[in-house]
Image (cartoon, helix red, strand yellow):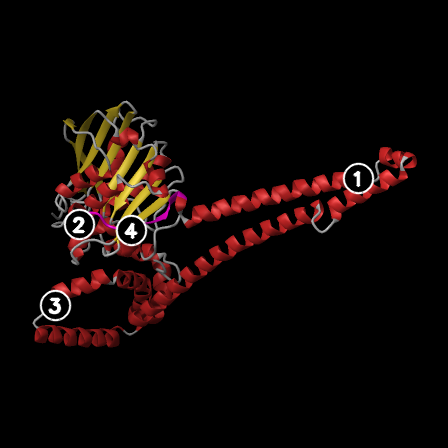
Amino acid sequence: MTVPLSVTGGVGGLTASYADITTEAQQLTALSGRLLELAASLQAMLADPNVVAGAALDPGGAARFEGALAYALDGPNGLTLTATGIGAHALTTRGTVLAYQAKDAALASMASSLQYAAGEVVGSHPLAVGAAGAAGIAAWLADEKLQGRDAAADAQQFLTSHPWLTRDIVNMAPGVIDASIENVSGPMAPLLRKLLGLPPFFPTTVPEAAGLAGLLYPDGSPHVVADPAYAVTPPTGLGSLFAELGAEEGNSQQVLVDKVAGPNGQGVVIELPGTQFDHWNLVPLQQYTTPYDLSTNLRSMSAAETTYLDGVVQSIESDPDITKSTPIMTLGHSQGGMIATQLAARLSADGYDVTHVATAGSPVATMTVPDSVQELSLQNTQDVVPQLSGVDNPDLPNRTTVSFAAGDGTVGGDHSVADVYAPVAAQIDQDTEASIARWKQGTDVFFGGTSATQTALTITRTFPAASAGH
């Protein structure tokens, strides 16, 4: 499968371009200053004692010299005006960059405010909105039946064909929650918020809403069991790694740690699986032992630490074969991509040499990536899961996003790592686009190995209480 790729961010992204233009403006400003200094020093030559003394011997020559110099310095194309023009151009260039950045920020803020306001309307009038929504759905279902169509398939096709709808609904959630709390608690809302230690208005962003919902699910502490290491074929690229994740898609409950050795040195690749299909663990206030679930999704989206993340960190930092100078790549699909992004930040903060992150179908837009780490995010535009961030991935020199359209039009099919993301990852392995090429720099330590071992980690939650869910 070969699909058209759209690349944003990275060294070829707008932010990198803005930075280059700003650097150019700074260089022009410095050049202008140096030229003005030169002009001032040359102006002083007109009153130099030697020039004045020479004028007595050759008045005509001195006059021609001073006239030519004055014209070269102060004429219409003279050095002084040229230097001033360069400085003015530098200021204009810098101002243009600032204007574009301010415009982008203003548009994003306006969109966020409108979506929050729409959510407040829904939360303030839940019965009316619910009744209207139910009537609309009932009419649509009746038409689907009349036409003899598959309503479930058509609903999925509509959702995957309009991924922005998922983003809008997600961005409305904070307003819905805020207004709903006002409805339930009424005049007691300020007191309730004060007793709970909550801000006057909450939540206002998708991460805040996810974090609030995540409080309904106890997370416990990690218990990690590492299987004995065994020899494997060294990874050859992103395609081979995502294909391995896809082989156990939705069923794997193990994190894979690959230790690769070869002529380019030793490196470690950490493969992180996504949410498990049979362990969503939706009922709140239960002590679920499997961490690959809804709770981890909610907590990760709010940038909170999780049992899943803590378990991987404990394992890596207690492994004597992984030193703080060992290059590390983290890689994951869906939930695993969120953990991969958080893991890169966590290990980097602890002094480890995380150099690369790769995610597929993961809502990582609001997460932080250290400047020293290069992240590559694969996003199927028909996949609703990456839209859960509520915003686009940031356009930064160290964060490259590769977008494409692929899949069968179903929610699960368009999110599949095996059928969608792994084949595109293999295509990216051969791509030479500038931002992708920059991400690939330094990956030979992971993909150029001659031998490798793999350790499988099983992470579970433990709780102080004896009773636990499944």
Image location of residue 396, percent across then percent down: 40, 46
- Which element carries disc 1, helix, strand or loop? helix
Residue segment shown in magenta: 1-11
Q: Which residue is mark 3?
A: 151
- Tag 1–tag 2 contact (CB < 8 Å): no
Badge 2: few (under 14), some or many (20 or more) residues near its Cα, within 10 Å? many
- Which element carries disc 3, helix, strand or loop? helix
Badge 1: few (under 14), some or many (20 or more) residues near its Cα, within 10 Å? few
Image location of residue 68, percent across then percent down: 78, 43
Image location of residue 92, percent across then percent down: 58, 54
- Tag 4–tag 3 contact (CB < 8 Å): no
Relative depth, front residue between 398 and 227: 398
Q: CA distance from mark 3 to mark 1?
A: 86 Å
Q: Which residue is mark 4?
A: 403
Amino acid on which disc 1 is placed? Ala
The label number, if any, that marks residue 416 in the structure image = 2
Pointer 1 or 2: first along the chain: 1
Task: Please name which of the two marks, 3 or 1, marks the residue nearer to the observer.
Answer: 1
